[in-house]
Image: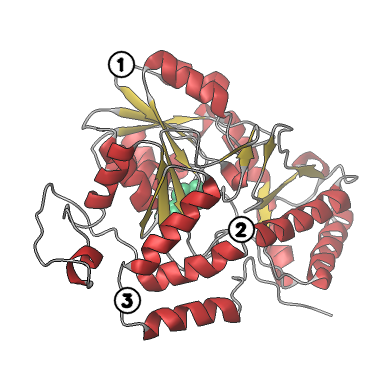
Amino acid sequence: MKREIPFHRPYITDEEVNYVVDSLKNGWLTMGKKTIEFENKFKDYIGSKNAIAVNSCTAALHLALKVIGLKKGDEVIVPTTTFVATAEVVNYFNAKPILVDIEPDTHLIDISKIEEKITSKTKAIIPVHFSGQPADMNEILDIAKKHNLYVIEDAAHALPAWYKGKKIGTIGDITAFSFYATKTLATGEGGMATTENDEWADRIRVLRLHGINKDAWKRYSKEGTWEYDVIENGYKYNTTDINSALGLAQLKKLEWMWKERLKIAQRYNEAFKDYEELILYKVKDDRISSWHLYPLKLNLELLKINRDQFIEKLKSRGIGTGVHFIPLYRFSYYKKKLNYKSKNFPISEWIFKRVVSLPIFPGIKEEEVDYIIDNIVDIIKKNRK
Ligand SMILES: Cc1ncc(COP(=O)(O)O)c(C=O)c1O
């Protein structure tokens, strides 16, 4: 029987609905008490000193670069294979994203290729915890220390994730999380910055709301007063209490949702491990992934079909997939801006031609996972060379 299994289905229960309804009924829609509660609970969960809620991970990354003082002409190291937001925020400053190739088995930034890209203009490294697996943070922090660079972590995928026992969100200078609709904690749109640095945290709080030194809660609530000052030019990056209500409900079940993802990843790993046509994604021993994504690679040398044809075949059987990611140097904007060629990044190219992301989300039914596995195995068997 043909099924329809989307790449992602958000896990929204009556609890989320009730939290949002409560927020709608309590007379405070924008950033207020619920956002403060969400930030506090998030910070406690991560174990970070500060957590500042914003309306996207992109906003968190932008403000992180702002508070470390990124300037025109500076350079920032980023991996080739990430969502465009990681590099886009560097462009906001008329600074330059410098691409570094990734590792073949983990798709993480290749630490052996970072130092050759560092110049006197380099200001920061943005490691991406791809698919939820933490990047090689110790080595990245060592390189950063040696060259006097900041480390801003793109943790859009990495909630929760652990590196050598430490939770992501407590390691680099500033960490940016995403609550976009498909993420491990989803509020539709949303993000959070965590940092141990109180001065940066205060400045991010001001910058997220027009550079105003008091947010609306401090002005219009019973405890507040009307007066405020604008202390620098800011942005409209604040979140809302409706989003934060969703976030609070999702945070309560975050660990359960993560364990569900883990179980699905283990089932896929077990089912595919004996097929030479499939290359399993590797998670290093000293870290724990959130399994936001389940990337699978095709051993094209053993197959008659390419990755795109494989995706089409899955689609015709009702299975939604994704490709994470199109490497940045392949986009016309970056081709023009950075003048990079595909041949400069052999590993990224090798991965891009082979990789597909399978559905992995809490709430997927056992029989849906069975259906995905059976169909992948069937396609592989029918298309062996
Ligand atoms: C690696 C990575 N970084 C940043 C972002 C941007 O997140 P947001 O949509 O919350 O701005 C995403 C979103 O998909 C992402 O995958």
Colour pattern of the rendering: secondary structure
Residue 253 vertical placement versus 160 (above, below): below
Question: Of circles 1 and 2, which is in front?
Answer: 1
Q: Which residue lies under the disc numbered 1?
A: 120
Residue 328 vertical placement versus 109 (above, below): below
Let me know if residue 368 appears in the view.
yes
Viewer-closest of 2 and 265: 265
Let me know if residue 83 appears in the view.
no
The residue drawn where x is 56% and y is 24% is 138
The residue drawn where x is 38% and y is 86% is 25
Numbered marks: total: 3
The residue drawn where x is 71% and y is 58% is 261
What percent of the width, then of the height, locates residue 296? 72, 48
Q: Which mark is residue 322?
A: 2
Within 10 Å of disc 1 (Cα), the crowding (few <14, some 14-19, many 20+) is few
Q: Measure how far apart labels 1 and 2 are at the Cα level.
A: 38 Å
Q: Quadrant of the N terminus?
A: bottom right
Give the residue type at disc 2: Gly
What percent of the width, then of the height, locates residue 237? 29, 58
Q: Measure how far apart labels 3 and 1 are at the Cα level.
A: 46 Å
Q: Quadrant of residue 254?
A: bottom right
Within 10 Å of disc 2 (Cα), the crowding (few <14, some 14-19, many 20+) is some
Q: Which mark is residue 29?
A: 3
Q: Secondary structure at mark 2?
A: loop
Give the residue type at disc 1: Ser
Question: Of circles 3 and 2, which is in front?
Answer: 3
| Residue reaching furthest to the bottom | 25
Q: Going from the N terminus, do you reach mark 3 or mark 1 first? A: 3
Q: Secondary structure at mark 3?
A: loop
Q: Is residue 118 left or right of residue 311?
A: left
Residue 55 vertical placement versus 26 (above, below): above
